[in-house]
Image: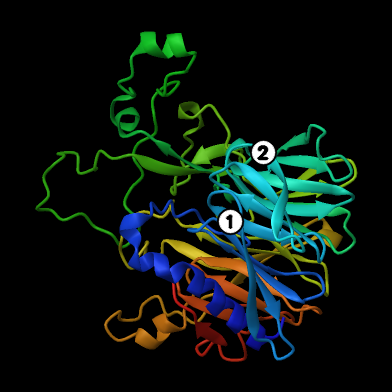
Amino acid sequence: MSERLLATAAAALLSLVAPWAQAGDTYVNFEVSHVHPIALTPSGAKLLAVNTPDALLEVFDVEADGSLTPEAAVPVGLEPVSVVPRTDAEAWVVNNLSDSVSIVDLGQRAIVKTLYVGDDPTDVAFAAGKAFVAVSQEDALWVYDLANLDAAPAVVPLFARDIRALAVSADGSTVYAVALESGNETTVVDANVIVDNTALLDPARLTALGLNDMACDGSPPPYPPLPPGITRDPALTDPPSGVPEVALIVRWNGTSGQWEDEAGQDWSHCLPFRLPDQDLFAIDAATLGVTPVAHVGTSLFDVSVHPGNGKIYVPNTDARNAVRFEHPLGVQGHVVNNRLSVADPANGYSLTFIDLNTHIDRGSDPATNHAERDASISQPGMLAWNADGSVGYLTAIGSRKLFRVDGACGAGACVFGANRAAPSAVEVGE
């Protein structure tokens, strides 16, 4: 996709939703998050875009100069979030609120079949004669036989929360899925458990519900000391112990096999469970066997396959929720890392992490660092590649920008061009 066409397409998509900003009192906006809302047909002759507020698929002819001519507006289900053309003549639209997929004949400009899938579908992909539908609230893929769409789909459960986006390997043998809320193997120890080893829960109700208490099996460890360089204000006399009676976030240590706070204390006897961190899933398109990939990120927004090297790119944010206190040695506004995680299927899905904000000086003054902030990216979203993978285009949900990605770069310093402080980007609006 040329840069000129991409910019034109982005403007066209924005124009579809702009009128509703002026007529907000006549429309209840569910604000469902787009996943893959815009796509070219395989030949590049048509541009397809979901018009979410109007529940339409908008179809444009792509002219020789890259300009767009509106061709049709096809009614689909409620809150369409993704459109994926299967051929030049057929497109599948995923309707999040309607819990359905609309199969649209682009020649007839009409829906020819509706598939009623599970709760809150988000995306669809095609491989090995099958259609894979991501069903976010069921944490699963529904897999349909394209030769017999009336047959019951196979259901492939994925052990993660909110399956969001799909992609297919170049040879069509593997479907990749990512979870929006995959977690990062952290959890919370309740403040009452830390102080008095009780969660103040009704034992009879817990028994009736078949649930365990949250108390520790034995005495809980002491609350960890303040981080180095941090001292408590002596004027604060409550509580008398000097230790704030608040909850504590702990992280699973895979090496030691225990829940640990930042001081390395073991809280496992207070937390008799595990939280897996499965983020990316590789599904064999033929057998539907699943290979999970862990520790990709905390909130995963998209997945794509690099056309040149076959590596899997996952735009994500990685939470720093286990870091305590808002101070220069702690959070200091740095609540997440914005990054691209790159998995190499040729090397056991080994991971490379690209920090997308390497230019930021974490000690800079917010009153004067405007240029630094203008060059930053927040919540990297959809990533689309040109034909050979030399260039990618990355949306930024929290930055109002479209960034140009260097497909040959594997580091933060060069990912948006030679000078990270002056990225190749264009502002496109909300």
Residue type, mark 1 in image = Val
Q: Quadrant of residue 430?
A: bottom left
Q: Which mark is residue 302?
A: none
Q: Is residue 271 left or right of residue 347?
A: left
- Is 65 located above or below residue 172 in the figure? below
User: Where is residue 336 drawn, in percent x and y?
Assistant: 46, 62
- Structural crowding at the residue carrying mark 1, measured as other residues with C-alpha within 10 Å and reported as few (<14), some (14–19) or many (≥20): many
Front position in the image: 59 or 236: 59
Residue at image mark 1: 81
Residue displayed at 83% across by 60% down: 169
Residue 116, percent across and down?
Answer: 67, 38
Q: Quadrant of the N terminus?
A: bottom right
The residue beneath circle 2 is 117
Whole-percent x, y for residue 234 in the image: 13, 53
Q: Is residue 259 above or below residue 207?
A: below
* Number of other residues with Cα within 10 Å of mark 2, as a class: few under 14, some 14 to 19, many 20 or more: many
